[in-house]
Amino acid sequence: MSGEFVPLLYLVSGVLFILALRGLSSPETSRQGNYMGMAGMAIAVVTTLAVARPETGLSWAMIVGGIAVGGGIGAVIARRIPMTAMPELVAAFHSLVGMAAVLVAAAAFYAPEAFGIGAPGVIRVASLVEMSLGAAIGAITFTGSVIAFAKLSGRMSGAPIMLPARHIINIALAIGLVTCVVLFCQEQTPVYFWAIVALSLLLGVLIIIPIGGATMPVVISMLNSYSGWAAAGIGFTLGNTALIVTGALVGSSGAILSYIMCKGMNRSFISVILGGFGGETAGPAAGGEQKPVKLGSAEDAAFLMKNASRVIIVPGYGMAVAQAQHALREMAEGLKEAGVEVKYAIHPVAGRMPGHMNVLLAEANVPYDEVFELEDINSEFPQTDVVYIIGANDVVNPAAEDDPSSPIYGMPVLQVWKAGTVLFNKRSLATGYAGIDNPVFYRDNTMMVLGDAKKMTEEIAKSL
């Protein structure tokens, strides 16, 4: 391929990536955004292979075979994974991006002449710095994503793990990491390179284990940002413009999303990035004393909603687990046929990853104009006759506003208790992911409709 066309093709792929991010910002254009991102990545990959293949000596058959194996594995996993497991799948994929950055950095260190950055022992200092940053961020992303995957998938406790003197340990590791980078740039020995990797792997574990389950959506977004910066660092080492642009886009957009998520959960952005500085607020609190609750049936819920003029539905992770989004839409259609106004209220951190509820509702073809974010709908609860909460808990907990001792205090929540009647669908009266009791269960205007979210919603739809 002619060298003059390579920058142009990389520019086209970069523009497509930017348009993809723009498209993904809205449910109406998200599908188109995905297509643009796929097209941009295809152009970048083909261009890179066309340029690099003659230098590697690899045949197209070997390259296509490798892509087919990796792509086939990814396709099978993506098709088999349920939506409820999507957050841990994202975390697992982030770990692979991090490890890829570490391996590319190692390859550049041991074979610098193949990358055009010098010869063994005389690598350019700028390339050494880029290599160190890519390896360090990649290693942190790898182990951090593995811990996030374990927490999200239930393979380890979602509660914060607070090590004694963890702040001092993290600071010591950070100082050691910086020292190793400086020494590596001066002496260019394998000992310091692998010391950078080892310290970063350990740091990745230590900055994620103090973060509680309630903050996991922020962690997913943060690790996404880390993976982008790791890719950008390696892009500088490889001299690959497309990788630099892509990594910078992913890193910056992930950082911005993390900041927005932190604001939505009243978490300190710096605290989350530094791994639990102030992380005590993320831990679970003791459950409240069990009190009498009013229990209702599907028929009771159907009667109340059918005779209301306005119903707001609040979906949560329980809806995702039960895959109840299609039944929920059927129920909403029945209410609208009865002349009831129906809206959906989405908390920014409902579920286990950013936009989790929006994706599920879109999958069920819920009209976009019926879905509202917290800041747009919170003022409407006092004028609402019935709120139907399906599988949500922490995001509708008034302790976030009333109890300074609560671990979720200060987090903006959906003020469902201000509605005329609250129908609360959960499997049981168990606490949410943050591990705290919800006072809404015991309010006079609340009726608990306990049971599986999908079955209960289907029964309500039939009763309508």
Image (spheres, rainbow, N blue to C red):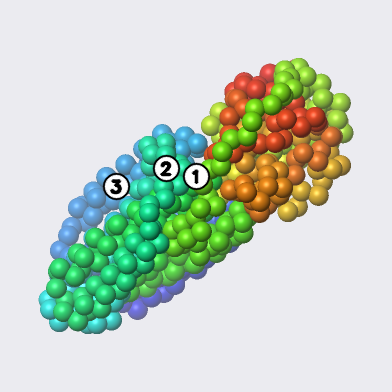
Q: If the image is split into quadrants, where does the N terminus sit?
A: bottom left
- Labels 3 and 1: the sequence-earlier one: 3
Label 2: element kind: helix
Please give the label number shown on residue 177.
Answer: none
Give the residue displayed 37% in from the left and 47% down from the top. 147
Q: What x and y, as percent, mark residue 144?
A: 37, 53
| Relative to 16, residue 208 above or below | above
Judging by the rendered image, the residue that carries numbered circle 1 is 213
Residues at discs 2 and 1 in contact (Cβ within 8 Å) = yes
Label 3: element kind: helix
CA separation, marks 3 and 1? Answer: 31 Å
Decide: few, some or many residues near mark 3? Use Cα within 10 Å; few <14, some 14-19, many ≥20.
few
- Closest to the camera, between mark 3 and mark 1, is 1
Left or right: 287 in relation to 342: left
Q: Nearer the viewer, residue 10 or 102?
A: 102
Does residue 134 appear anywhere in the picture? no
* Amino acid type for the residue under numbered disc 1: Gly
Left or right: 88 in relation to 69: right
- Labels 2 and 1: the sequence-earlier one: 2
